[in-house]
Amino acid sequence: MNNFNWKDIKGFFFDLDGVLVQNGVNIPGAVETLEFLHKRKIPFRILTNRTTQSLDTIHDYLQERGFPVKRKEIFSAPLAAVHYLRRKGRATCRLVMREDPKKDFAEFTMTRESPDYVIVGDLLNAWDYSILNEIFNLIMNGARLMALHKGRYWIEETGLHVDIGVFIAGLEYVSGKEALVMGKPSPDFFNLALEDIKLEPRQVAMVGDDILADISGAQRMGINGVLVLSGKYAKEHDHHYNVAPDVILPTMSEIPNLV
Ligand SMILES: [Mg+2]
């Protein structure tokens, strides 16, 4: 079928929601799996599209839940945006996101009028017509639309929730301009994490529950895609995407038995 072999895997990228934690509860065995990897000196990074929280808050969240993760092992979508903007020099920004992740952008100049970039993250229930219209007008006045991610949906106990991809795609449609997308499945995001972990793509397994952002995104970069069934993945939602994971596992807790 494919050439995947656990013996080739020298490091891991883990998605957070649906892989380490689901509905606020640790996936059984997830903490122990990360402890096992530390003990075996197998490096890993957490690659999350969470955009409602700053890097410090995500780090605190994982620490409180017992995950042995260092701040520098976390790659969040806002962090990818920060790296991008640093390379661009003196860009001015307008941030459309919750307050906490704005902390990650403290080094940049903010402006409400004619920013170089309008950077959009999750607003949850705060989305409304006037916000969308404001972003639309900034784009039409020359701002580049930067999406912290373009996720489709996530799952909670109450059911499926549309993610910001619905707004990003709509803004692209009305403006005729393509957004820069920062989180998974952006190649830049995976490249940043690959440079940091110092491994070749084929030596890394991306473990995730999102068939497009995690699995397809990783595979496009030559990274192995390991789909876990502990999160939002459901065949009836995703069958039409035609993505074949390299491996499918019930949860990431299987990994110590495989590497
Ligand atoms: Mg996920």
Image (tube, helix red, strand yellow):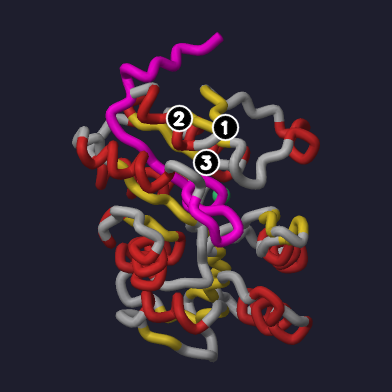
Residue 194 in view: yes
Q: Which residue is mark 1?
A: 250
Where disc 3 sits, the SS reads strand
Is the residue marked 3 within 8 Å of ligand 1, measured from its CB?
yes
Which amino acid does the dot numbered 1 rest on?
A: Pro
Q: For residue 155, which quarter of the picture?
A: bottom right
Q: Is residue 11 magenta?
A: yes
Q: Which amino acid is tagged 3?
A: Gly
What is the distance, in whole Å, between disc 3 and disc 1 at their CAs? 11 Å
Q: Which residues are magenta?
A: 1-26
Mark 2 vs 1: CB contact within 8 A: yes
The N terminus lies in quadrant: top right
Q: Which mark is residue 254?
A: 2
Q: Position of residue 115 (x, y in %)?
A: 50, 82
The answer to whether 108 is drawn above or below residue 222 in the figure is: below
Q: CA distance from mark 2 to mark 1?
A: 8 Å
Determine the image quadrant of residue 130: bottom right
Q: Secondary structure at mark 1?
A: loop
